[in-house]
Amino acid sequence: MTTANIDARRLKKRAETALIDRLIAQESLGPDGIPCLAAVPRDRPLDSQGHVGLRVWCKFCVAWHLHGMGYGHRVAHCVAAESPYNQTGYYLVAATGGQS
Ligand SMILES: [Zn+2]
């Protein structure tokens, strides 16, 4: 791997870390006590028509959770057994401050 490739990967990782920090900071609780997670578009379209799903960062799985199109309540499917999201699910809400 070239030095340029390594630098590009570091820059991408730094940008993703900043995005994750921003999304975690925007998590809130809805009026029903169910978490609201800030969602951004997925990296790749869902289909050849360019439909784009949403993703949220899960601080319990320490991974992205991928969803289809549209905001609203979702089942979490957390792989982290201790995740409270497994009890309530969460709402996908639009992230503020940019979409990526
Ligand atoms: Zn999770």
Image (spheres, rainbow, N blue to C red):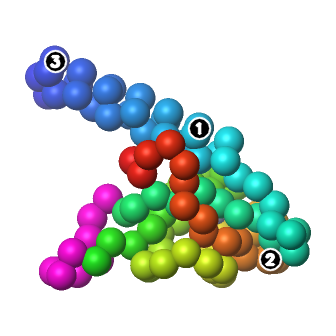
* Mark closer to the chain start, 1 or 2: 1
Helix, strand or loop status at disc 2: helix
Residue receiving disc 1: 21
Disc 3 from disc 1: Cα separation: 27 Å
Q: Amino acid at mark 3?
A: Thr
Picture quarter with ligand 1 = bottom right
92 or 10, which is in the foreground? 92
Instruction: Count the labels in the image.
Output: 3
Residue beneath the point at 28% across and 77% down = 51
Position of residue 58 measured from the top left corner of the image (x, y, whole percent): 62, 57
Residue receiving disc 3: 3
For the residues carrying marks 3 and 2, which lies nearer the camera in this image? 2
Residue receiving disc 2: 88
Residue beneath the point at 59% across and 57% down = 38
Identify the image quadrant of the N terminus. top left
Disc 1 from disc 2: Cα separation: 23 Å
